[in-house]
Image (tube, rainbow, N blue to C red):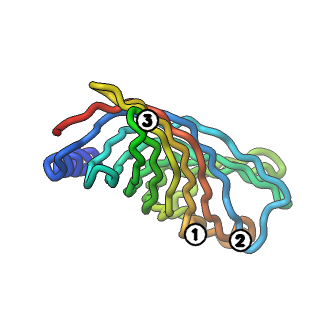
């Protein structure tokens, strides 16, 4: 069902805008967490690959709409009396406005917009008198709402474009509700940053 919705959305967008670029991308994403009201004594963060689609729909010569869903995983550890490791799959759905500067072949650009993250298969591993693993679907929200922004550079050739971009995503909603008797972590907000690169092909004018 999710794949069908994505296909229908892309189909609608490609018929709405005169110039469309479609492609693929890969990259690396690093995710940290903001713990409230107290930060942990120590933390470990990981860089994890991401893979996705890339699409850009021109509104004017400078302004575009970028829709580039991707899949990655998120993993981080925190220690505060006990050590806890949280992992999950993560489907990233950014809805971004992009403004580019025409320097000929090279086109630097900036982008910003809302981001929806679909969290899948969250798990918790604690290390306290041994290793304890459990599914925490009931304790973790299904969706993360964030603001995403960054900058990038396109190199435009006659029949294709290669691009690279760096981004930062600031999570807006608390994702974790601790079970009864657990006091850490209490509120968890994600902070992600990373880099993407890929290739796209023009369609339309």
From the top left corner, tell me how far across and down residue 113 is, in percent: 43, 61
* Apparent side of residue 203 relative to residue 90 in the rendered image (left or right): left
Which quadrant would the C terminus be assigned to in this image?
top left
Q: Quadrant of residue 184?
A: bottom right
- Label 2: state its secondary structure: strand
| Lower sequence index among marks 2 and 3 | 2
| Lower sequence index among marks 1 and 3 | 3
From the top left corner, tell me how far across and down residue 68 is, in percent: 38, 45
Tag on residue 174? 1
The residue lying furthest to the front in this view is 103
* Apparent side of residue 48 relative to residue 164 in the rendered image (left or right): right
| Lower sequence index among marks 2 and 1 | 2
Location of mark 3 (residue): 106
Q: Nearer the viewer, residue 17 or 35?
A: 17
From the top left corner, tell me how far across and down residue 15 is, in percent: 13, 48
Tag on residue 36? 2
- Label 3: state its secondary structure: strand
Q: CA distance from mark 2 to mark 1?
A: 9 Å
From the top left corner, tell me how far across and down residue 41 is, in percent: 85, 59
Is 201 rendered above or below residue 119? above
* Apparent side of residue 59 relative to residue 52 in the rendered image (left or right): left
How many residues crowd around disc 3 within 10 Å: few (fewer than 14), some, or many (20 or more)? some
Q: CA distance from mark 1 to mark 3?
A: 40 Å
Q: Are marks 2 and 1 in contact (CB under 8 Å)?
A: yes
Q: Nearer the viewer, mark 2 or mark 3?
A: 3
């Amino acid at each position: 069902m999710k794949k069908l919705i994505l296909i229908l959305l892309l189909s609608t967008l490609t018929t709405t805008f005169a110039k469309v670029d479609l492609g693929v991308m890969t990259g690396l994403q690093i995710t940290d967490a903001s713990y409230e009201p107290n930060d942990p004594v120590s933390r470990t963060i990981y860089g994890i690959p991401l893979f996705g689609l890339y699409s850009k729909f021109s509104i004017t010569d400078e302004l575009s709409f970028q829709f580039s869903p991707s899949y990655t995983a998120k993993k981080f550890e925190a220690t505060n009396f006990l050590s806890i490791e949280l992992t999950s799959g993560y489907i990233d759905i950014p809805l971004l406005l992009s403004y580019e500067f025409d320097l000929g072949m090279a086109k630097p650009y900036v982008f910003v917009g809302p981001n929806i993250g679909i969290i899948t298969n969250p798990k918790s591993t604690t290390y306290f008198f041994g290793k304890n693993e459990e599914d925490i679907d009931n304790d973790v929200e299904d969706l993360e709402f964030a603001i995403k922004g960054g900058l990038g550079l396109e190199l435009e050739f006659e029949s294709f474009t290669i691009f690279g971009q760096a981004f930062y995503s600031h999570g807006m909603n608390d994702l974790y509700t601790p079970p009864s008797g657990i006091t850490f972590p209490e509120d968890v907000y994600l902070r992600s940053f990373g880099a993407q690169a890929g290739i796209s092909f023009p369609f339309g004018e």
